[in-house]
Amino acid sequence: MIRGTCVLPAGTGKTLKVCVFADADQHEALLAAGADAIGSDQVILDVVQGTADFDRIIATKEFIPQLKRHARFLGPRGLIPNKKSGTLVTADKLVSSVEESKKGLVEFRVNSASFIMTKIGMREFEDEGLTENLEAVMKLLVDKKPETVKGKYFEKAMVKTSMGRPVPLDISRYQEMASDTNAF
């Protein structure tokens, strides 16, 4: 299964609200990097009660027991940090993780029908911004191609708005890249 995160060069069009659980000596640097809040028991209670709303919680492994006590509230919202989504990091990567989240980090994974659905921008974006974001996602997918995959890696690709009709894309270039992984 392919799963990962990608920083979109033109952003997502939405600024994420990020809460970080870290040691006290890093708080100042994290706030300077763009963190909206520093985690504490009170912040967790605010999230559970619905008075605080975050899109992403980033933490080091020392804070996982504190967060897991509230897993039944945080889990369904996708707020429990984990390595695969880039939200469970080491202390030296906290600042870069916050910066990436603020720049436009998106998660993607292949579902059981071999579809990949991820955000590449908003309808208001210029064509260049959407193209840059699509290029970044496709290149990352080619880089993550499992060695066991034989034949065509991409069958077809479409772009669509949330409620709009899909528009097919010409993916011949990406199929060539996938067949020759040294294309980059």
Image: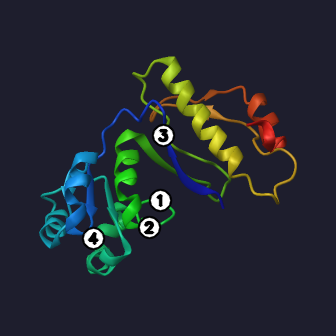
**C-beta proximity under 8 Å, tags 1 and 2:** yes
Identity of the amino acid at label 4?
A: Phe
Q: Nearer the viewer, mark 1 or mark 3?
A: 1
Q: Which residue is mark 3?
A: 119
* Helix, strand or loop for disc 1: loop
Residue 93's x, y, as percent?
Answer: 41, 59
Q: Where on the picture, by quarter, is residue 131? A: top right
Visible residue check, residue 47: yes
Tell me the CA gap for discs 2 and 4: 16 Å
Say if 54 sits above or below 119 in the image.
below
At x 63% / y 33%, what residue is drawn? Answer: 158
Say if 138 sits above or below 30 in the image.
above
Q: Nearer the viewer, residue 102 or 53?
A: 102
Q: Which residue is mark 2?
A: 82
Tell me the CA gap for discs 1 and 3: 15 Å
Identity of the amino acid at label 2?
A: Asn
Residue 177's x, y, as percent?
Answer: 78, 37
At x 16% / y 73%, what residue is drawn? Answer: 41
Q: Nearer the viewer, residue 91 or 58?
A: 91
Q: Which residue is mark 4?
A: 73
Q: Which residue is mark 1?
A: 85
Mark 3 burial class by Cα count in 10 Å: few <14, some 14-19, many 20+: many
Identity of the amino acid at label 3?
A: Lys
* Helix, strand or loop for disc 2: loop
Residue 102's x, y, as percent?
Answer: 34, 43
Q: Is residue 31 toward the left or the right of residue 134 in the image? A: left
**C-beta proximity under 8 Å, tags 4 and 1:** no
Q: Nearer the viewer, mark 4 or mark 1?
A: 1
